[in-house]
Amino acid sequence: MTVSAEDTIANRISRVLAERIITGVLEPGSKLRQDHIAEEFGASHVPVREAFRRLEAQGLAVSEARRGVRVASFSLAEVQEVALMRSVLEGLALRMAAPHLTPFLLERAEAAARACDAATGIEAWGEANRAFHKLLLSPCNMPRLLAEIDNLHAAGSRFLFATSRAGWTPRVDTDHRAILDHLRQGRVDQAVIALERHVKRIGEKPVRYASGKTGAAFALEG
């Protein structure tokens, strides 16, 4: 098997496993068994190990000595860490992107904000929210920074899915409007401050897992 073929398979495995982790099909602490996953995808252990590394980079899995790879838990401390990292990195990205944000891009971001407010389910809200942030941050033209932010969004999506299984209540996000208003008025410092505050919002809800177990889950709401 060529390196490119193994990489393609690793991409597919990591995407499928990430979706299962984010949506709660794979519960926190559950073991990711390399043999079983390799058999499921008809792959060797090489792309499976690479998929595991990608999940770890996204904060979705952890590798433990003598215990193998497990689905990461989401304690309050872990959610706070993701929130703080997002705050710092997205603030930097927005500061660098601001000079390149055109009226057209801001209008598209406004449309994404409206889609967030109108969302009737977590999937629709998550997609619109990611679009809002990407539209504002992508013009920074810093691929490594944007890749790390994308990993943090994946971890954040998992937290949010966990706390939203009991139902979704549409919400109007005034932070999105405040960020856009500041940018349109050329108030970059205020826009960065608003964004940094926005991505550090954390909520807590009870959650029931597929196994029937219950617990408390924390989530990023920005």
Image: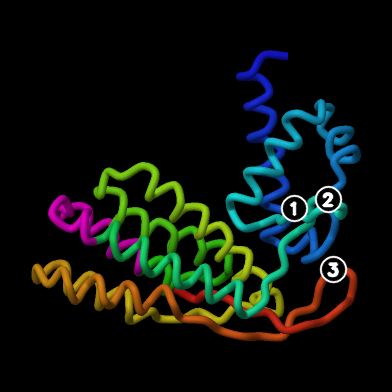
Name the image quarter holding the C terminus.
bottom left
Disc with the residue nearer the chain's start (2 vs 1): 1
Q: On the rendered structure, is 114 left or right of 36?
A: left
Residue 117 in picture, x, y percent from top left? 41, 74
Within-10-Å neighbours for mark 2: few <14, some 14–19, many 20+? few
Mark 3 or mark 1, which is nearer to you? 1
At which x and y percent is residue 183? 16, 67
Distance in Å between CA atoms under marks 3 and 1: 23 Å
The label on residue 210 is 3
Q: Is residue 103 magenta?
A: yes
- SS assignment at label 2: strand
Q: Residue 213 occupies which quadrant of the picture?
A: bottom right
Residue at 30% over, 65% down: 91
- Residue contact at pointers 2 and 1, CB within 8 angstroms: yes
Give whichever of discs 2 and 3 has the lower sequence position: 2
- Comparing 68 with 134, the one in front is 68
| Amino acid at the residue labelled 3 | Ala
Q: Which secondary structure lies at badge 1?
A: strand
Q: Which residues are magenta?
A: 95-113
Q: Residue furthest top?
A: 2
CB under 8 Å between discs 2 and 3: no
Tell me the residue at 44%/77% (across/down).
200
Distance from the alpha carbon under mark 2 to that under mark 1: 6 Å
Local crowd size for mark 1, using a 10 Å CA cut-off: few (<14), some (14–19), many (≥20): some
Position of residue 182 in the picture relative to residue 31 (left or right) = left
Q: Earlier in the sequence, mark 3 or mark 1?
A: 1
As measured in the structure, the alpha-carbon distance from the residue carrying label 2 to the one carrying label 3 is 23 Å
* Residue 63 circle label: 1
In magenta stretch: residue 105: yes
Residue furthest to the front in view is 65
Which residue shows up at 68% across the image and 23% down it? 6
Q: Which mark is residue 68?
A: 2
